[in-house]
Amino acid sequence: MSTTTAPSSEAASAAPVRFETRPEAYRHWSFQVEGPVARLGMQVSEHEGLRSDYELKLNSYDLSVDIELADVTRRLRFEHPGVRTLVVESSVPRIFCAGANIHMLGSSTHGFKVNFCKFTNETRLYLEDMAAECGIRTLAALNGTCAGGGYELALACDEIVLQDDGNTAVSLPEVPLLGVLPGTGGLTRLVDKRKVRRDLADVFSTVAEGIKGRRAEQWNLVDKVVPSSRFAEFVTERAQELAQGDGPRGRTANAEGVVLEPLGGTYEQGGVTHRNVTLAIDGRVGTITIKGPDAPPPADPAAARANANDLWTLRTARELDDVLLDLRFNRPDVGTLILKTEGDAAQVLAWDAFLAEHAEDDWFVFEILATWKRVLKRVDLSARSLFALIEPGSCFAGTLFDLTLACDRSYMLDDPDHPVSIELSALNRGPLPMSNGLTRLETRFLGAPDTLAAALAHEGPWDARDAEDAGVVTISPDDIDWEDEVRIAIEERASLSPDALTGMEANIRFAGPETLETKIFGRLSAWQNWIFQRPNAVGEQGALTLYGRPERPVYDWSRT
Amino acid sequence: MGNVDLNARIPNNVNLKEDRRLQRALEAWQPKYIDWWMEMGPDGFQADEIYLRTAVDVGRDGWAHFDHVKMPEYRWGIFLSPAELERVVPCGDHFGDPAWQQVPGEYRNMLRRIIVTQADTEPASVEQQRLLGRTAPSQYDMRNLFQVNVEEGRHLWAMVYLLHTFFGRDGREEAEDLLRRRSGNVDSPRILGTFNEPVEDWLSFFMFTTFTDRDGKFQLLALAESGFDPLSRTTRFMLTEEAHHMFVGETGIGRVIERTAQVMNELGTEDVDKIRAHGAIDLPTIQRWLNRWYSSSVNLFGGEQSSNAATYFASGLKGRYKEDKYEDHVALDAIYPMDVPGNGGITTEEIPLRNAMNEVLRDGYTGDCEFVVGRWNRILEKAERSERMYLPHRRFNREIGIYASGHYDVKGNPITDAEWEAKHDQWLPSEDDLTYVKSLMKPCLEHGKIASWIAPPKKGINGNPFEWDYIRFDGTSAGVALGASPSLTG
């Protein structure tokens, strides 16, 4: 297949989705910082969604709204280190948020829906990460209608305050009204995070109009209900209370932030070009190449901050993130990804050492590490087959070595004439956990604690043969076998059913314990994606198809 | 309250005597209702004896039983229109199935929402009107106000009956919430916007009973077509009472217009100041009140394109006004040509009929209102005046629906923000108007007397003359403090 083959997804045939934005360009949110309190007000522009065939009424959202939310979540961490509380609210009277736009969902392809939900789920997790990692407390101020995705957004905040006017309710109407699930973490957070009793969660999730007032508080659907007349005042006071004291790692009132400049990549049919990360597409196979650092790390965190936008480590993480999103939304046919690196492993290790040394005490350095953590998780969660090719001239050490562990397989050339090595850094040993809470090495060696211990104890680089013996690469073909081995592996992979591969990969990548995150992506999303394919939701007489239309849905009553 | 007492005090045709579930619910609710009535009902006149009509039966003679009663002792009853034999679901996907005598589980939440929304308007209007007794233009009008109030109370009972009987604990909780919300209260407002606007003067009261209660009439007419038979029968009976409220409103405004025309003729003037100096309300001011309350009431029908409306119709929970006049009761493939605001003007779009059901009902309402305005104009005609009242366009001054985001003149033409600002006081009550109308609001409670701004009715209530003691004032009554003669010992 050539690169000129028409994409199969409607989303891809529309204008490509771009993920870079900045507060001045927001169309759907107001964002204000006053001292230690930031206020993020939803005010969705009806006619400025991603596509023009639906209107984003009643603060309902599409991807364009969530891209801005993801952006502000990231910028808040980097640009406003003095902020202690984020108030998530609405700038529209009597409406907080009506959730994801149903007409958008109803008219989107399956693939787009899946990726939309994945992105929105990641963004909500980023909100929670921000609270946990930066100590920025999040307060959802529900001034009115708060349905579906609107309530799921609130669920991702630390505290939820609901206006009590005898009428305003929180609700998850997806099951009774749309025949789908509250799939942006709603069901999971209800019982796992807020620990709402399962029978009450059952009642709540089947009452389209939701639960209001005191009962919402009693059931722990919200933390507090406040009369309308005191609502604004209460939110302001509570935000100030939550904003007391300094944050971790030097997040003080006078800490100066770092403005994230646009990456300004070049996007073409054949791929993406960023400074440190490129994507080159050949048919259904894409090759991501990451350039290692060509200079040593800065002398200290202050020097790093001064040069933030050109800093190799941060820039590379951001560029890789952008490439992953571009692949997900704009290049659905590129099912197999080859991961390569170019550069000096020693330099990568030096940068890792810099991060490891300062991340404990310096908020900015920590943010770089946290960015890598999120990007690596996004790799884990990408529904593409991932093969790492560890070849001469590559620099798969430390952070970049973790990328090979995020891949489904890794191939390391065993050629004594062109030696190649891989090596761990401190960052492989804890700070970059997967969504199951374990490091990629721990997950890899779940059933072999001795092998894990040996790998962790290993000092210095592994050559190809040792690496295969240590189990840290999949296979180390020699120079004679290499070309064929790699070619056949890629061709074979690219020939398998993309659906089966997606399911297979998602099931074997995440061994180990369950967490809120793994449940959201592994259970809630999987069921949602199944329902999204079923006639009861998307058939001609399905509930999602018919929502807003004059007909009532007709269900096939058989249960599986 | 014991069961025996309950049965004696609550006239009904729902076999309350045998219905333990309803008895239990009412035992808890009824005292709270009385508390609400004392707190939020007509202020200052609870000890007076009012000449009120009480429904004691659904038969021809039963529903119009007149007597002097104290309002807190009014016998609020529960009546359903007699059951129709073999009634079927009159519309939607279940068209032709036997009508439901119990709530279908799949529609329980929707039905509860419909009933609660309707029910909430009933106590709301009592609250909105609670201070009007103190400025009544005559005993006759005061009596009509209180009649409207007690009947709105009864309509609340009718809806609460449905909640208590068919919706279990949820229904009982909703019934309590109906007594907890307060019109205009920022913390606990009534559900619909219009029912949070204060009705502060009698001109507003008559406009409210003409236009807002007429929305109620049309909502009841649509609910009378419900496949849920108890709702249909309940609303059918409520309609007989609603008719009186609109009578009060329409004849009230008619009498104001009659009086104004009379003053204009006597003085031979159209000058607003001169008319006002004579204590009458000039026609442009009446028109502005009309514009305000009509446009506010038009909002109550909801969005022009509504998936809720489609669902209610499809489910057979709410039909169209006079559903039996239509041939197609399923209305699945039909379309409704709808004017929608587009780029730079109004265009017509074809909307699936089911999604346009709010607009269909609004069409009926608007037509009905046109007739009312026509009858008011006949009063002007009869007085040989050339001025005419008009009904503004439904796009005018909207807060809900597709016209809410722009401005439109009274003929429905799109206008700019600046034009709107410039014309606002010409179309809607100004501060000046409000001050003037408020200045007229002085009680006139002496036997047979009437205020300067309104003509007396052609005839009184139930064959009695206008000059009659419709109210027997208690010595402690606010009415006595306001100049009425006490006829009861306090």
Image: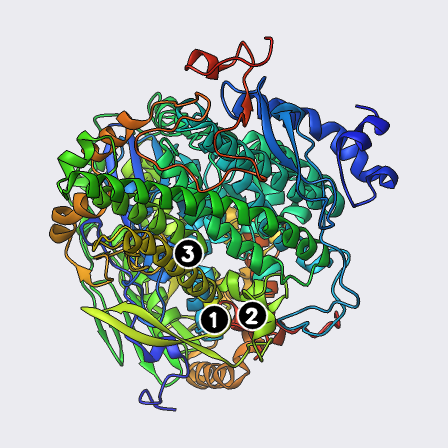
Q: Do the residues at discs 3 and 1 belong to one chain?
A: yes
Q: CA distance from mark 1 to mark 2?
A: 10 Å
> Local crowd at mark 2 within 10 Å, few (<14), some, or many (≥20)?
many
Q: Of the residues tagged 1 and 2, which is closer to the observer?
A: 1
Considering only order in the chain, which callout, 1 or 3, is on the residue closer to the N terminus?
Answer: 1
The residue beneath circle 2 is A532
Which amino acid is tagged 1?
Gly
- The answer to which image quadrant residue A40 occupies is top left
Residue on which disc 3 sits:
A376
Q: Name the secondary structure under disc 2.
A: loop
* Residue B383 pos. (x, y %): 28, 50
Residue named by callout 1: A106
Compared across the picture, whether A297 is left or right of B251 comes to left
Residue B423: image location, x then y, percent:
15, 49
Q: Is residue B159 left or right of residue A379?
A: right
Residue at point 59%, 13% (across, down): B488
Q: CA distance from mark 3 to mark 1?
A: 31 Å
Marks 1 & 2, CB-CB < 8 Å contact = no
Residue A309 horizontal/vertical position (percent)? 18, 50
Check the image and report above or below for B161 versus A559. Answer: above
Left or right of A523? Residue A144 is left
Precedes in sequence: disc 1 or disc 2: 1
